[in-house]
């Protein structure tokens, strides 16, 4: 019994009530009928897997599709497939007919759907999604839909800038060195897709370099340690984001660049990681705060009603601290970023509760990144 219990003893009537509740719970547990296995239960939601290709085709697409179908059977979702090279599984026609038609899916998984549009000198080359299909996807996302991008999901729709913003920060596939073993470093171990991962995750895979660093616009989950492999031409340097997420135009987006090798889709760790991305974007686990970004909170701050005296005084101070925190995060100084966010959050409580909660989400991320960085060699 601690000091707080001695100072505030539980009244007798409350103790009796607690005992009754515990007893009832134990009895319910003892006499409960064992639930049926997960795959026998009614499915809770639907997922669309897009593996269609118009250019180079990754050999892992079939394995990824089958792995997601198996995960659905185990975890309570059904899977539709749209893929011009899997005739036994694919839908007969495009599912991207309208945002309303896509609304049946809790999330859409783009599995390396390369379309050959990386030659930006030919904007008329056919894309994975034509204008009407892309409009349907936009409407779906803006209505709260989910998006999962796996591996070469960033090597499609190069001539449609909105898609690269959806996948994250405008970062598109640039090139990759030979497949080799490298170390991935978990930056945010609190996300539902990373909480099961080792902080230093060594894998053999194909490691992407990107056209730009997306950190300014996304919530980085995992980085790639270039000192542990040869990144070759196009190396990104000390800050090489590899997996990230963000709340985008009303929807949720999650991307993982690893997963080129077929072995990933029988690896329990990778599968758990991928499942976490699917479930988060589907809204089954976590919330929007798991992938809060600095730009998102900056927009919230800009919309705060500055008419009150506290807001007039505090909003500029919060803005200065938020800007300083973002600059520190971009410099990978997560500890300093967390300090500025803690100060900003304290001020925000007097201005706007939602803003204070959003700042707390950023602080949680930066505190986790500080601890993760300190905990990996």
Image (cartoon, grey):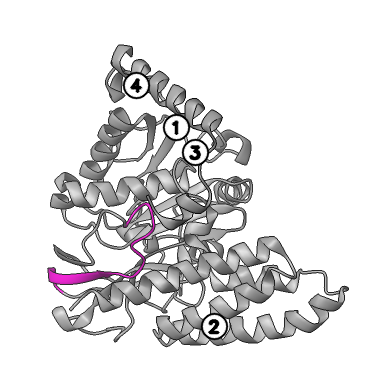
Q: CA distance from mark 3 to mark 1?
A: 6 Å
Mark 1 vs mark 4, foreground winner is 4
Q: Which mark is residue 340?
A: 2
Residue marked by disc 1: 46
Q: Is residue 144 left or right of residue 300?
A: left
Q: What element does badge 4 sit on?
A: helix
Of marks 2 and 3, the one in the foreground: 2
Camera-near label (2 vs 1) is: 2
Circle 3 residue = 106
Where does the C terminus fall, quadrant-wise? bottom left
Residue lying at 24% horizontally and 85% vertically, measured from the top left: 233
Query: In what element is the residue under mark 3?
Result: loop
Q: Along the polypeptide, which appears first: circle 2 or circle 1? A: 1
- As drawn, the label of residue 277 is none
Q: Are marks 1 and 4 in contact (CB under 8 Å)?
A: no
Position above or below: 291 against 239: above
Marks 2/3: CA–CA distance: 36 Å
First along the sequence among labels 4 and 2? 4
Question: Does the stretch in magenta take in 143?
Answer: no
> Dot 1 lies on which element?
strand
Residue carrying label 4: 26
Q: Is residue 275 shown above or below 326?
A: above
Residue range corresponding to the magenta coloring: 178-194
Question: Relative to the observer, which residue lies in front, 168 or 325?
Answer: 325
Instruction: Give x and y (percent) for residue 269.
Output: 20, 51
Residue 230 in the image: above or below residue 281: below
């Amino acid at each position: 019994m601690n000091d707080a219990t001695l100072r505030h003893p539980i009244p007798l009537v409350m103790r009796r009530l607690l005992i009754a509740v515990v007893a009832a719970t134990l009895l319910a547990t003892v006499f409960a009928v064992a639930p049926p296995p997960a795959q026998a239960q009614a499915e809770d939601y639907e997922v669309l897997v897009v593996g269609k290709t118009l250019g180079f085709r990754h050999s892992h697409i079939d394995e990824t599709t089958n792995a997601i179908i198996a995960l659905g059977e185990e975890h309570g979702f059904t899977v539709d497939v749209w893929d011009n090279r899997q005739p036994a599984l694919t839908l007969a026609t495009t599912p991207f007919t309208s945002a309303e038609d896509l609304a049946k899916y809790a999330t859409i998984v783009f599995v390396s759907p390369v379309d050959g549009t990386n030659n930006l000198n030919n904007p008329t080359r056919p894309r994975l999604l034509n204008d009407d299909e892309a409009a349907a996807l936009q409407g779906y996302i803006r209505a709260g839909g989910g998006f999962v991008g796996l591996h070469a999901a960033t090597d499609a729709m190069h001539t449609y800038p909105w898609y690269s913003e959806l996948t994250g920060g405008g970062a598109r596939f640039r090139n990759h060195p030979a497949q080799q073993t490298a170390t991935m470093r978990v930056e945010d171990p609190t996300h539902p897709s990373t909480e099961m991962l080792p902080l230093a995750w060594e894998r053999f895979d194909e490691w992407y370099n990107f056209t730009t660093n997306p950190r300014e616009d996304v919530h980085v989950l995992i980085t790639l340690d270039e000192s542990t492999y040869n990144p070759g031409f196009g190396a990104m340097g000390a800050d090489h984001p590899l997996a990230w997420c963000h709340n985008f135009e009303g929807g949720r987006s999650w991307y993982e660049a690893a997963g080129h090798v077929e072995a990933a889709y029988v690896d329990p760790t990778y599968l758990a990681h991928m499942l976490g991305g699917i479930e988060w974007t589907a809204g089954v686990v976590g919330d929007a705060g798991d992938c809060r970004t600095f730009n998102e909170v900056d927009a919230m701050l800009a919309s705060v009603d500055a008419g009150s005296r506290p807001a007039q005084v505090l909003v500029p101070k919060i803005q200065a601290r938020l800007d300083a925190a973002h600059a520190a995060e971009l410099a990978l100084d997560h500890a300093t970023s967390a300090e500025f966010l803690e100060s900003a959050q304290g001020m925000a409580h007097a201005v706007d509760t939602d803003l204070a909660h959003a700042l707390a989400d950023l602080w949680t991320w930066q505190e986790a990144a500080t601890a993760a960085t300190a905990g990996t060699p």
